[in-house]
Image (cartoon, grey):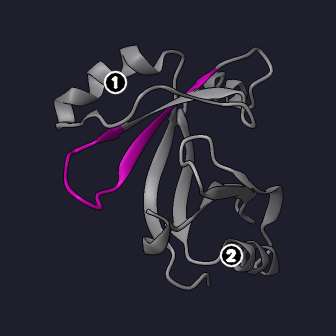
């Protein structure tokens, strides 16, 4: 178990994040970020929120290049992409995930969408893609 892990956002693959965001308005979600380019994943991301402080976000993930990993998801009927958990200690979370049989597919790197924070990626033993996001420290705001 990863101590103090909290659900941060759910990633949904899409061909066009700005167009897709309009369809989420039905559920009371609004754009909560600019479209952000993530060079590590070769995608553009856009976050949606219901406006509640600390609420779980939806991250719309669109490919920014033909070789973006998210393209594989877009070829399936299921556009669920990943679940992100915010964690206190990213290195320990990676070690804990590995000890539980997760395959670490990306060691901690700077997060394009979260300046000053890092992310890591893993596949669980049941093949779910999980993003681990380093929790923002109050003294770094």
User: The C terminus is located in which quarter?
Assistant: bottom left
The picture quadrant where one finds residue 61 is: top right
Is residue 100 within the magenta segment? no
Is residue 58 rendered magenta in the image? yes
> Crowdedness of circle 2 by 10 Å Cα count: few (<14), some, many (20+)?
many
Q: Earlier in the sequence, mark 1 or mark 2?
A: 1
* Residue 21 tag number: 1
Q: Which mark is residue 61?
A: none
Residue under circle 2?
93
Residue found at x 72% / y 31%:
39
Q: Is residue 60 left or right of residue 115?
A: left
Tag 2, which secondary structure? helix
Label 1 residue SS: helix
Please tell me which residue is depicted at 38% across the width and 14% down the height of the picture: 19
* Residue stretch in magenta: 48-63
Residue 129 horizontal/vertical position (percent):
66, 52
Can you give x and y, in whole percent of width and height, for residue 102 in the image?
A: 78, 67
């Amino acid at each position: 178990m990863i101590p103090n892990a909290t659900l941060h956002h759910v990633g949904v693959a899409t061909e066009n994040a700005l167009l897709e965001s309009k369809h989420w308005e039905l559920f009371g979600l609004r754009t909560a970020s600019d479209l952000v380019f993530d060079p590590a994943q070769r995608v553009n991301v856009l976050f949606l929120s219901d406006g509640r402080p600390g609420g779980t976000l939806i991250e719309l993930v669109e490919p920014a290049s033909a070789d973006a990993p998210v393209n594989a998801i877009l070829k399936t009927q299921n556009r669920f992409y990943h679940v992100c958990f915010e964690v206190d200690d990213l290195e320990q979370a990676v070690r804990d995930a590995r000890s539980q049989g997760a395959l670490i597919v990306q060691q901690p790197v700077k997060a394009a969408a979260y300046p000053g924070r890092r992310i890591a990626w893993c596949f669980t033993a049941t093949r779910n893609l999980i993003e681990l996001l380093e929790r923002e420290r109050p003294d770094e705001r």
